[in-house]
Image (cartoon, helix red, strand yellow):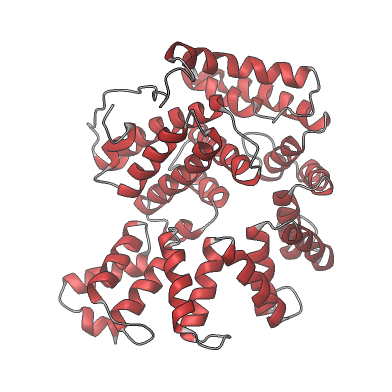
């Protein structure tokens, strides 16, 4: 393994992914919670690169769920690959939203998945003849913690452990049977359909046993038709159960779907209620959604003061889109009293967090030098990052610059 980690082969594609891979590996054994959180970010960034390569620039700024759904629908990734990406996403979400959640076996599984997906990306989009030395298990930073002989055993026993949890109706079961079954199908794709069906059976058992995360995952599967027959009625039932049990994501999802009528009967009043419950549980994405819709009067009665408050709180929790909205509006004085220092601070934080539109807007602001100090070289670097992440407008600007017409294009 390279001294820079197993993902060092991505250096020419994305230094950010190499860095995330290093952090993921460094934390695998002594802090699997942090490792899973980094794995989630890695998966999101890799999916953004796929979207950019496929020319689906709109997807770069979408949620990971929306991005994966669209990529699978257009055939850019297989449903099996989507299930692997989803495993990383859901395990990462659990780690992010539950400081006590940590699982070495799940972190190892996520690491292996991301390696295989990264190799596929290199072959698919960079070099069809790309070859790599093969997967190598990361080594513990303190060898006595987990012996290398135990790693394969951990992976092999993971599914058995989860099945026993659910069969005993353990309320602490995390509902990961579906993902484990889907991943196990990688070795023999012909068996994948049966394994998904078996996984869904155990997932349903975990939900019936009272596991809240399993309720939310079951709702997601039923509402979207992800690897199962779509059943909106059943999906809504489980989404409501998870919401009533206090799951922050479920309350946000139920609120949004009711507010806009996405798959459910539109009910703005109830939708607002669930969104507010999710914001009160300090779920950043819900804060941003509620704040923006109050700020714009989009589906809700306009309330600029409250909308600004929720956008601010979401930004302070480092929700990328909220940081971009706040930064842009403060920097340009859009609906806010102009504040250059704060505007620049938040827009840059959003850009540094990988929010593509923020990268572009921050780059433009640096180049134009109208609302902040001009720095053309730095601005071009940010526009290049945005273009590499799939932003068409930034890419068009760079093409104009290359052709010697960039000053004209800016007018």
**Quarter of the rendering occupied by the N terminus:** top left
Q: Where is 404 relative to 266, above or below?
A: below
In this image, 172 relative to 114: left or right? right
Q: Where is 1 relative to 47, above or below?
A: above
The answer to whether any part of residue 14 appears in the image is no
Choose between 15 and 400: the one closer to the eye.
15
Q: Quadrant of residue 229?
A: top right
Q: Where is 357 relative to 121, above or below?
A: below
In this image, 251 relative to 81: left or right? right
The residue lying furthest to the left in this view is 404
Residue 56: x and y in percent read 42, 56
Choose between 19 and 133: the one closer to the eye.
19
Choose between 316 and 208: the one closer to the eye.
316
In this image, 302 relative to 88: left or right? right
Residue 170: x and y in percent read 79, 24
Q: Quadrant of residue 372?
A: bottom left
The answer to whether any part of residue 232 appears in the image is yes
Residue at position x 65%, y 77% in the image: 308
Residue at position x 15%, y 76% in the image: 404
Residue 172: x and y in percent read 75, 29
């Amino acid at each position: 393994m390279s001294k820079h980690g197993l993902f060092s082969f991505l250096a020419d594609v994305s230094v950010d992914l190499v860095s995330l891979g290093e952090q993921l590996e460094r934390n695998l054994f002594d802090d699997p919670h942090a490792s899973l959180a980094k794995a989630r970010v890695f998966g999101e960034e890799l999916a953004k690169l796929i979207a950019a390569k496929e020319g689906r620039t709109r997807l770069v700024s979408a949620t990971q769920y929306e991005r994966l759904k669209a990529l699978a629908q257009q055939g850019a990734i297989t449903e099996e690959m989507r299930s692997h990406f989803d495993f990383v996403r859901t395990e990462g979400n659990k780690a992010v939203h539950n400081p006590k959640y940590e699982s070495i076996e799940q972190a190892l599984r996520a690491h292996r998945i991301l390696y295989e997906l990264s190799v596929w990306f290199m072959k698919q989009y960079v070099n069809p003849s790309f070859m790599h030395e093969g997967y190598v298990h990361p080594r513990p930073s303190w060898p006595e913690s987990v012996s290398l002989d135990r790693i394969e055993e951990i992976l092999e026993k993971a599914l058995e452990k989860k099945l026993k949890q659910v069969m005993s109706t353990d309320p602490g079961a995390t509902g990961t049977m579906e993902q484990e079954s889907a991943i196990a199908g990688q070795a023999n794709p012909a068996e994948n359909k049966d394994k998904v069906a078996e996984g869904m059976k155990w997932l349903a058992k975990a939900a019936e046993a009272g596991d809240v995360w399993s309720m939310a995952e079951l709702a997601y599967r039923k509402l979207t038709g992800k690897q199962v027959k779509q059943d909106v009625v059943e999906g809504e039932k489980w989404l409501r159960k998870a919401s009533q049990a206090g799951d922050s994501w479920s309350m946000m999802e139920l609120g949004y779907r009711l507010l806009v009528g996405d798959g459910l009967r539109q009910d703005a009043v109830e939708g607002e209620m669930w969104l507010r419950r999710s914001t009160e549980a300090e779920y950043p994405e819900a804060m941003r959604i509620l704040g923006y819709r109050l700020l714009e009067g989009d589906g809700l009665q306009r309330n600029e003061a409250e909308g600004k408050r929720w956008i601010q709180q979401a930004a302070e929790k480092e929700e990328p889109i909220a940081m971009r909205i706040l930064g842009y509006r403060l920097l340009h004085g859009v609906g806010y009293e102009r504040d250059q220092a704060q505007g620049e601070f938040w827009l840059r934080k959003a850009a540094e967090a990988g929010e593509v539109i923020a990268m572009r807007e921050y780059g433009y602001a640096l180049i134009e030098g109208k609302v902040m100090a001009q720095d053309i070289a730095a601005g071009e670097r940010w526009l290049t990052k945005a273009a590499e992440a799939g932003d068409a407008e930034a890419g068009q600007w760079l093409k104009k610059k290359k052709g010697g017409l960039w000053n004209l294009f800016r007018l």
